[in-house]
Amino acid sequence: MKTSDFDYELPPELIAQTPIEPRSQSRLLVLDRAEGSLTHRHFYEITNYLRAGDVLVFNNSLVIPARLKGRLYPFSGKAGREVEILLLRPLGNGSWETLAKPSRRLKTGAVIKLGGDSETSLTAEVTGEADEGKRIIRFSDETKLAEVGEIPLPPYIRAKLNDPSRYQTVYAETAGSIAAPTAGLHFTQELLEEIRTKGVRCLFTTLHIGLDTFRPVREENPQEHKIHKEWGALSQPAADELSQAKREGRRIICVGTTSVRLVEAAAQAQASDTGEIQPFAGWVDLFILPGYRFRVANALITNFHLPKSTLLMLVSAFAGKELIDKTYREAIAQKYRFYSFGDAMLVI
């Protein structure tokens, strides 16, 4: 297995630049693993594939205004070159692990001013350096970050997003992600109510999405890739519901790869494979590749992912690489929209 096995050619015009309105009008490609069949639908028709007793697992992480723009201040006090900072994870005491550029100019001791001369302005000092352009930065007033920051869109989205709430799920609640759990962007409150009315259980978990959602795997052997840690939590009621569903043979349908990684990490964290799911809170660095044995997830709702990404590798592990290759070829031929604001697929 090589990273290049997960590469494919995508016409640039199929990279969705803006979200579909309303959310549930996006297209849905249904992959039936048992039959190897593909069916073209719209997302609002997903209720036709759900039945009473199913459990949908959502990721309720909310995207934070993690992109900060400022200027590098030399000791002379004159405004310096423009700097962009992407918050990755808090380290405590006002310090964050960040991705900063231009990294070559941001050495330890460098000072950045954010927010201009407004009342919300603050300073940031580089206190440490790491690989891949990462910097440890301490902010003078961490409480102002939300005021000076903006929602970070993936680098392949170049169109301006007029409504930042469209890069949040309608059920987003717990702040911490630097990217949206995009499979959930297709749900409206009305569709969720229709799903519940059908007797489907909706569980909300949390996994804060980090850097890996943007970055392709660079190592030719994907097993050498070090996935970034993401913080997640599975509550006691959610764990109990999942355990009961497993005992009763009811389907557990994960909305997005992040939900898959969280429930599978929770299952792996247990001392014995009894089938019972325990509550979980901690860092998740589970990298799912073909050959992985899924313990919890029975079906998956997901978007179409970047070539050579950990997300595409997870989906290939879940459905089988040949079926995913077939599905992606069909999606491209039928001009589905790809990536964060793109269309969805349901793997059953």
Image: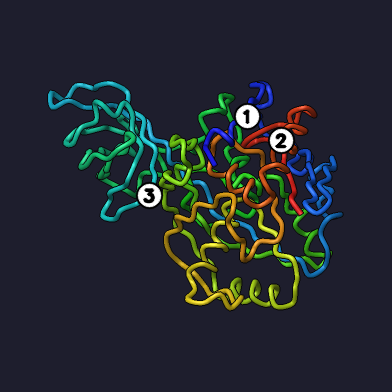
79 in relation to 238, above or below: above
Name the amino acid, label 1. Tyr
Which disc number belongs to residue 89? 3
Q: Position of residue 227 (x, y in %)?
A: 44, 47
Would you say the residues marked 1 and 3 are in contact, meaning their CB atoms lie under 8 Å apart? no
Tally of numbered discs: 3
Decide: marks 2, 1 in contact (CB < 8 A)? Answer: yes
| Earlier sequence position, callout 2 versus callout 1 | 1
- Mark 1 vs mark 3, foreground winner is 1
Disc 1 and disc 3: Cα gap in Å?
A: 31 Å
Question: Which residue: 42% across, 59% down?
Answer: 283
* Mark closest to the chain's N terminus, 1 or 3: 1
The quadrant in which the N terminus is found is top right
Q: Residues within 10 Å of mark 2 (few under 14, many from 20)?
A: many
Q: Is residue 221 above or below residue 290?
A: above
- Circle 3 packing at 10 Å, graded few (<14), some (14-19), many (20+), is many
Q: Position of residue 134 (x, y in %)?
A: 32, 38
Q: Which callout, 3 or 2, points at the residue further toward the start of the chain?
A: 3
| Above or below, 348 relative to 271 | above
Q: Which residue is mark 2?
A: 328
Which residue is the site of mark 1?
Answer: 8
